[in-house]
Image (cartoon, grey):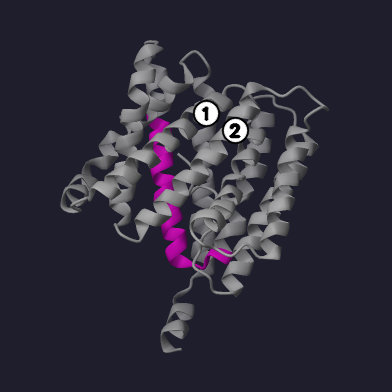
Amino acid sequence: MVARQHQKNDSRPVAGVFWMLVTGVCFVGVTVLVKFVGSRIPAVEAAFLRYALGVVFLVPMVQPILRAGLTNRQVSLFTLRGVVHTIGVGCWFFAMTRIPLAEVTAMNYMAPIYVTIGAALFLGEKLAMRRIFAIAMALLGAFVILRPGFRELNPGHVAMLFTALAFGVSYLLAKVLSDELPPTVLVGMLSVSVTIGLAPAAILVWVTPTLNELLLLFGVACFATAGHYTMTLAFRAAPVTVTQPVSFLQLIWSVLIGWIIFSEAPDVWVVLGGVLIVSAICFITWREAMLKRRQITPLEGQTKL
């Protein structure tokens, strides 16, 4: 009881909301810069350069990884996570050049729903009726965004379905490994494995990037790294029930930026579908907090680049 009261007193909701707002700005910055890179550079090469240029941020993680003494089982799990995350990152970069910014953002919110389903299937989480209802609402949201039969689906939409699924699997594997290893090892190993995983495909389709494209992709690496760091600060400052809803402002920002900068007219169906998905994730998060479960549903951003 004393420990719980102490934790409650330590909560700083204003700071948590602030850092989650900064996190949202960082992740929107990632999508905007990737959009500016465009399609001249193949998606898999752009993804590889994003990770390769971010190697400088891995330097502090080298020693923790070497000291971790990874077992064969852990190496296998890291390899599997690297493979699925590589697929997700490649599909995400491809989708960014094919469909509007708001649709990429909205569909990426499906990753936590896949995590909830996977946690029930593989981690023994109970799939109560409220979770089934939330999953159904999120799937309805995805259907509203895609509207199959009512409009032509772009390959980018298909890529985003695979992106969300891949990031969901990656997060579940991270959940398993996080019980055994510190976060620095998880982040470092993911970056290394994805860089290695993307390299062969990037070489096959290599197009020499311009200095401007390299600077933009280095900016992507900086924003992504900063976003994950500020998200950690938000977690430390306030409960997930406070910070989770703030992260979904990214959808509004994506709609506005896509409209103002990239002339992507707002689509009311995309916004409606995104709201349904967001509401489902917020409901699951709120119920888990009320029942004091171990957090399974991740924040949007935890399953990202």
SS under mark 2: helix
Numbered mark located on residue 91 in the image: 1
Magenta stretch in the rendered image: 218-241
Q: Amino acid at mark 1?
A: Cys
Residue 204 screen position, x and y as percent: 37, 12
Q: Is residue 52 left or right of residue 284?
A: left
Q: Nearer the viewer, residue 56 or 300?
A: 300
Residue 92 image point, x, y percent: 53, 31
Residue 102 seen in the current view: yes
| Residue 39 x %, y % | 53, 16
Secondary structure state at the residue bearing disc 1: helix
* Mark 2 surroundings: few (<14), some (14-19) or many (≥20) residues within 10 A: many
Q: Is residue 223 left or right of residue 138?
A: left
Amino acid under disc 2: Met
225 in magenta? yes
Estimate the spatial distance between the alpha carbons at disc 1 and disc 2, rounded to whole Å.
Answer: 7 Å
Q: Main secondary structure of the magenta part?
A: helix
Give the labeled residue for mark 2: 160
Picture residue at 34% right of the left edge, 46% below the top? 77
Q: Nearer the viewer, residue 246 or 193?
A: 193
In this rendering, the answer to whether 144 lies above or below 202 is: below
Marks 1 and 2: CB-CB under 8 Å?
yes
Q: Which disc number belongs to residue 215?
A: none
State the quadrant of the C terminus.
top left
Nearer the N terminus, badge 1 or badge 2?
A: 1
Magenta-span inclusion, residue 25: no
Above or below: residue 288 compared with residue 119: below
**Picture layout, residue 31 above or below residue 109:** above
